[in-house]
Amino acid sequence: MGTTRITMTPGARRALAAASRLFYEQGIHAVGVDLIAAEAGVTKKTLYDRFGSKEQIVVEYLADRDDRWRAFVTQWLDRAEPGSVDRVLAVFDASKAWMTESSPKGCSMVNAHAEISDPAHPAYAIITGQKQWMFALFADLVRAFAPTRADELARTLMLIHEGALVAHGLRIFPDPIGHARDRAGELLKDADDRP
């Protein structure tokens, strides 16, 4: 990722937990360090001593969510048969479970990108890094059973997946991730091109 992280003290963990909740619920730009400090029960000075800047709090928030997401999806992948379409569909199953448990307002990375579009911002690499990881994950999963079409199918799967995450947050229609999973299954039904 190339982004500098800090060592977490108990006070920093409390502040990060408060910041994470506030950033996700209210938006990164709408939440100031005064509110984070008050919610965490620490002083503003302590917050700056631990993190150095609000930008670093944002980095830690997004990096923490990214770490937890990658571990979460890996657990779902471990349950599916290696080299199968089921492993791709497990990503959609993991996303549905994650969104239900942790992200009712949609993907935190997509939401953060709406506020942080400057590549010079230290959190930008985390946001784009997660999406690049997702694309590579889809490509690797598909390559196991459709090696000649892996990149093409991964692009389509990525679009279906990300669209479902956005639709989930917008609540336009029920179960967009389930719908996306069904479309992914149809896309991959006859994709096996192994010799």
Image (cartoon, rainbow, N blue to C red):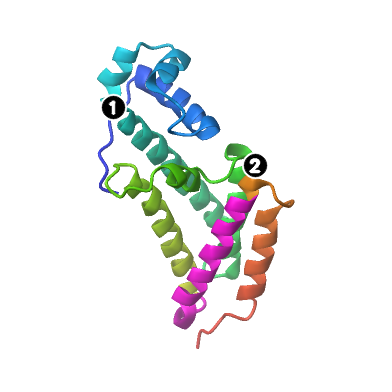
The amino acid type, in three-letter code, at marker 2 is Thr
User: Can residue 71 be seen here?
Assistant: no
Secondary element at tag 1: loop
Give 190 or 157, whichever is nearer the viewer: 157
Say whether residue 153 is magenta.
Answer: yes
Numbered label attached to residue 87: none
Magenta-drawn segment? 145-167
Q: Which residue is mark 2?
A: 100
Where does the image place residue 70, in percent across and percent down from the top left? 45, 48
Give 114 or 124, whichever is nearer the viewer: 114
Say whether residue 91 is magenta.
Answer: no
Q: Mark 1 packing: few (<14 Cα in 10 Å), some, or many (20+)?
A: few
Residue sitting at x 41%, y 34%: 61
Majority secondary structure in the magenta region:
helix
Q: CA distance from mark 2 to mark 1?
A: 31 Å
Instruction: Give the residue at the far bottom of this rendering.
Output: 195
Residue sitting at x 52%, y 74%: 153
Q: Quadrant of residue 104?
A: top right
